[in-house]
Amino acid sequence: MDFQSDSMVQDRVDLLIRGRIGPRQSLSRRFSRVGQQIRKGHGRKILVSIVLFFISVMVTTIIVSLSMRTGPSSEKEYSSHLSKVVSLGDILPDSFKAEFRMFQYSNKNISNITTINITINIEWERKVRHGFRYKEKRRHNSRGEDMLIVADNQAIIQLTSDKKTKWSCFKHVENLGFFSVLRLIVNATRTHQPKPGLECLGTLWSVYECEREIFICEVHKNIISIHDETLMARTTSFSLNSTRDIFLPKLNVTCHFASPEMETLERTGLDEHQDSIGLLKDPWKSCIFIHDTGIDSTSSNVDIEKMYWSNVRSFTPQCSEHRFIKLDTVNNGWDSVKLHKKFCSVVAGKTKVIKDTVIFAHSMGNLVMAAALFKNICSFDAKSSEWYAIQAPWKGTKFADKLNELCKMNRSTSGYIANEYLVQGLKDIHYCTEDGNPVPAFQSLSPKYISSLNVSFQDLIQVGKMYVTGAMCGYSPWGMGKNWHQSAVMLFTQAFADLDSRNDGVVPEKSCEIVGNFSNSYTSKFYRTKVNHIEGTCRYRATDWCKAWWKKQEGMPCKWLRHLGHT
C-alpha cells in the first residue's frame, strides 16, 4: 500500500479510538476493516499508534490526579511537609541585629525610590524567650521624633511634641506596620520568580501575606533588603548580636500584648494566599467614589484617588471605570446645596437619574448623597444601581460636639498623650483648622444639629434604608494599626470624646448600622469589622494582613470591596 493509503489506515484507527464512527458504518464493520489491514502487513504501525494513545491517557490521568492534591491532606502530613521546607529562618544566625532605612517606590518603576524618614532596628535571639525586639523611629520636622518599641512581650509608643515626650502602652500590635512584615522572615522560602526590576546578588526569598508577596534578599546569611509592593527596607547594618541595644523605658505599668508567634519569631506555617471568590458580576458598571470631610477648595492639586482611596482600584475589578468625586467637605456640611448640585451633576448628569452606577461613599459622603436624593435634586434607580455606605454617621456623632473643645486644647487627656500631639494629628487629617477651631463640616455632624434645609438625620436614615445595597462599619479606634500615628490619634480622640459604645474612633457603631443584617465576614454585604475611621477606604491595602492565627475575617476592608463585585 502506498503512503496515502497508509495514512488512511492511521486516520481510521484514530477515528475508531476517538469513537467518531460514521452514521453508515457500524463499530463491528470498522474493526473488521482494521483487522484486514493488520493481516495485510500494516499491523505494526497500527498497534504502535494504539499503544502510544493508551500510554498518553495513563500519563494524563496521573498528572491530573497529582495536580488535584494541592497540599497536605491531614495535620500530620502537613507537619511532615512543613518540616521538609527550607525557610530563611533555618539558615539565619541564632542571634543577630540589623538596622533598616525605609524607602518608597512606584510599583511600576522599582528604580524610582524616595526616602522615608523611618529607621527600623531589630534584634533576634533564637534561643531566648521573647527574643525578638523591634524599634521604629519616625522623624517629623515639626514635632521631632516618635518611636515604637516592641520588646520583652511589651509594646510602647513614644510621642514627641515641642520637645515634650509621652510614653504609652499599646496592646494592638498584631498588624503594626513593618513589624508585621519582619515577623514573617522565618517563613520565607526560595523563589525563582522575583519582582521585576528587583536585583539580588545572593538568594531571593519570598513569603505571602494573603495575596501580598514579600521578597527578602539574603547574602551569606545576612538580610540585605526586604521588598513589598511599594516599600523597601534596605539594611544599613547587619551583625551577630553580641550586646543588647533595644530596651524599654522605665514605666510604672506593664504593657503586655498577646501575640506569642511574634515574640519569638517561631515558624507558624505557610500562609494561605489564595482567596476563594466567585465570578465577576456582569455587566460591569461605572463606579463613583465619594470622600468624607477633610478635602477643601484649596486641594485642587490633590490626587484624591491616591491620597484617599489608594488601592481601591485594584480591588474593584467589576468597575468599567473609576471616577473619584472631589468636594469641598471642609467648608461645607452634608446639607450644603452646593455639594448636592455638584454630586448630582457628576453622578446623574443631565438626566438627573443615577442609573447603571455603583456608588461607594465614605462617612459624610453618604449624608451628602442621601440629602441630595431627599431634596429630589436627583433620583436613584435602585434596579440598575448599587450604593455601598462605608462608615456612615447616619445619626451623627458625639465626636463633633467635643471637637470644638479638643481643637482648642482646653481639656487634659489624662496623661495618655501630649495635647499638642493630639491636636496636630487632628490638623493633619483636617478635622481642626490651624487657628484651633473645628472645620465647618463637622458642625453638621453633631447629633443636635438642625439643618436650615429642614432635613433631619431621620430623613437621611429613611433614604438609606430605601436605597443602600450594602455597608461596612468599623468598631475599633486603633483598627488595623497600619499607620500607628493615625491609629493613636483615633484611639485618643474617641476616649476624649466619651463615645459610649463601640466605635471606629469617630462614628459609633450604633450610628453606622441602621440598615441590613451585619456580619463579621467580609463576604457579607453588610460587614462589621475591626477598622478605624481612616482605614475603611482601603487606603492601607493591606492594610489587609492575613491572620492565620487571629480572626481572619477581621480588618479586611479591601477584600470586602472585592467580594461585592463577585457573584
Image (cartoon, rainbow, N blue to C red):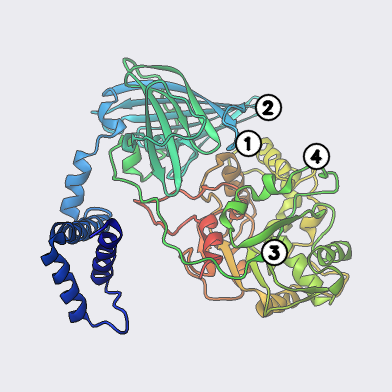
Q: Is residue 427 left or right of residue 19?
A: right
Marks 1 and 4 sit apart, C-alpha to C-alpha, by: 17 Å
The residue to which callout 2 is attached is: 162
Mark 1 or mark 4: name the one nearer the start of the chain. Answer: 1
Residue type pointed to by label 1: Ala
Density class for disc 1 (Cα within 10 Å; few <14, some 14-19, many ≥20) is some
Q: Tags 3 and 2 in contact by the CB under 8 Å rule? A: no
N-terminal-most mark, 3 or 4? 3
Residue type, numbered disc 2: Asp
> Which residue was labeled with disc 3?
286
* Three-letter code for the amino acid on which mark 4 is drawn: Glu
Between marks 3 and 2 in the image, the one whose residue lies nearer the viewer = 3
| Residue depicted at 46% across the width and 57% down the height | 554
Closer to the eye: label 1 or 4: 4
Locate residue 510, reporting x and y percent: 59, 69
**Marks 3 and 4, how far apart in space?**
38 Å
Disc 1 or disc 3, which is closer to the eye? 3
Between 89 and 279, the one lying in front of the other is 279
Where residue 291 appears, x then y in whole percent?
A: 72, 56
Q: CA distance from mark 4 to mark 2?
A: 16 Å
Q: Is residue 393 visible?
A: no
Q: Which residue is mark 4?
A: 434
- Image quarter where the N terminus lies is bottom left
Q: Reading the chain from its start, which is encountered first: label 2 or label 1?
A: 2
Front position in the image: 35 or 75: 35
